[in-house]
Amino acid sequence: MRIGVLTGGGDCPGLNAVIRAVVRKGVAAHGHEFIGFRDGWRGPLEGDTRPLGIPEVRG
């Protein structure tokens, strides 16, 4: 399954940790593929994406 991650861009404590946990669990346990959309809603409208794998969300 391919899953897109989109955030609104505002401050949200813990959001990076949530994205990291979802990507790690989704990839490791279920083999899902994740993509991130850049700059809020502009990302999906303009096709501005980047892959989100375990190396991209480590930290």
Image (cartoon, rainbow, N blue to C red):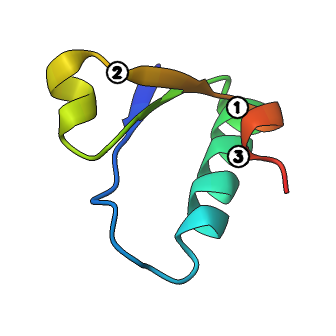
Q: Whole-Å distance between the Cαs marked 1 and 2?
A: 22 Å
Q: What residue type is disc 2 on?
A: Asp
Residue located at (74% from left, 36% from top): 56
Q: What residue type is disc 1 on?
A: Val
**Picture disc at residue 57:** none
In this view, 32 is above or below 26: above
| Residue marked by disc 3 | 25
- Check if mark 1's residue and mark 2's residue have beta carbons within 8 Å: no
Q: Whole-Å distance between the Cαs marked 3 and 1?
A: 6 Å
Front residue (pair 55, 32): 55
Does residue 33 show up? no
- Which x, y percent locates residue 35? 49, 27
Residue 48: name its quadrant: top left
Q: What residue type is disc 3 on?
A: Lys
Front residue (pair 31, 59): 59
Residue located at (26% from left, 47% from top): 40
Residue 57: name its quadrant: top right
- Check if mark 3's residue and mark 1's residue have beta carbons within 8 Å: yes
| Residue marked by disc 1 | 27
Residue 10: name its quadrant: bottom left
Ranked by sequence position, the earlier of labels 2 and 3 is 3
Disc 2 element = loop
Residue located at (57% from left, 55% from top): 19
Ranked by sequence position, the earlier of labels 1 and 2 is 1
| Residue marked by disc 2 | 48
- Which x, y percent locates residue 6? 34, 46
In this view, 11 is above or below 3: below
Q: Whole-Å distance between the Cαs marked 2 and 3?
A: 24 Å
Q: Residues within 10 Å of mark 3 (few under 14, many from 20)?
A: few
Q: Is residue 25 left or right of residue 55?
A: left
Does residue 57 show up? yes
